[in-house]
Amino acid sequence: MKKMLHHLKKADPVLAAIIERVGPYTMEYREPVFQTLVRSIVYQQLSGKAASTIFNRLLAAVKVDPLTPEAILKLRPQRMRTLGLSQQKVKYIRELARMTRGGEIQFERLGELEDAEIVAHLTQVKGVGVWTVHMFLMFALRRPDVLPVGDLGVRMAMKKAYGLSELPTPAEMEKIAASWKPWSSVASWYMWRSLENQGAM
C-alpha cells in the first residue's frame, strides 16, 4: 500500500494533494462471480440507493444467495419487472444468466485472463459494456491498473482537479493518467473520493 501511494504522490503533484486530503485508501471489493456482474447491471444509470433497493428485492425474490443463473431463469420476466427492473435490464440479466449457464461466460476463468481479454469476454453479453467491465476489473478482480475512461465521475474529477475547461476525452484522460501506471485503479478511486470530499457529487 505504501509503495502504491508513494509512487502516485511522486508521479503527480495534483494527485498527491488529493491523496493527502482524502486520506487512507479503503476500496471495498466484491467477489468476481455472477452475482457481482448482475449487481453492476442493476446499478447502471441509477442512484446507489435506488439500485440497492432493487437489487435487494431481486435477492429476496430468488431466495438464493449468492445469485445463480438457474435462480434468475426460474423467475418470469414479468416478475422481475415488478421488482423495479427496466425491461432492458431484465433482458440483459437473463441473457447473462443464459450465457453463464451455457458456458459461454466463465467466471472461474477470468482470473487467468489479461484485462483486455476480460473486456472482450464479458462484453459478449448485451448490456455489459466496457464501463461495466472496468468496474468489475477494479472492484471484483482487484486489477490495479484500470483507467475507467467512460466513467463520468472520474472525468468530472479530472476536469476539476486539473483545471480543464471541458470534460476530458478518453485520449486526454490517458495522457493525464500516464504517470499513474501501474496503479491507475488506485488513482481513479482517489478521483471519485475527491469529488465526495468537496461535496460535488
Image (cartoon, rainbow, N blue to C red):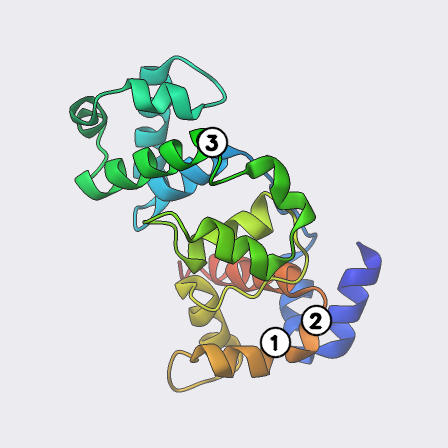
| Residue indicated by mark 1 | 177
- Local SS, label 3: helix
| Residue indicated by mark 3 | 35
Q: How many marks?
A: 3
Image quadrant holding the C terminus, namely bottom left
| Cβ atoms at labels 2 and 1 below 8 Å apart | yes
Which amino acid type corresponds to the residue marked 3 in the rendered image? Gln
- The residue furthest top is 63
- Local SS, label 2: loop
| Residue indicated by mark 2 | 181
Q: Can residue 21 be seen by looking at this rendering? A: no
Which amino acid type corresponds to the residue marked 2 in the rendered image? Lys
Q: Quadrant of residue 191?
A: bottom right
Residue in the foreground of this view, choosing between 47 and 105: 105
N-terminal of the pair, mark 2 or mark 3, is 3
Indicate the position of residue 137 as horizontal and vertical percent values. Answer: 57, 51
Q: Which residue does the image show at 35% across and 30% down from the upper left?
A: 55
N-terminal of the pair, mark 1 or mark 3, is 3
Q: Residues within 10 Å of mark 3 (few under 14, many from 20)?
A: some
Indicate the position of residue 54 as horizontal and vertical percent values. Answer: 30, 30
Q: Which residue does the image show at 57% across and 61% down from the upper left?
A: 116
Indicate the position of residue 61 as horizontal and vertical percent values. Answer: 31, 16
Relative height, residue 121 to residue 175 (above, below) = above
Residue in the foreground of this view, choosing between 181 and 47: 181
- Local SS, label 1: helix
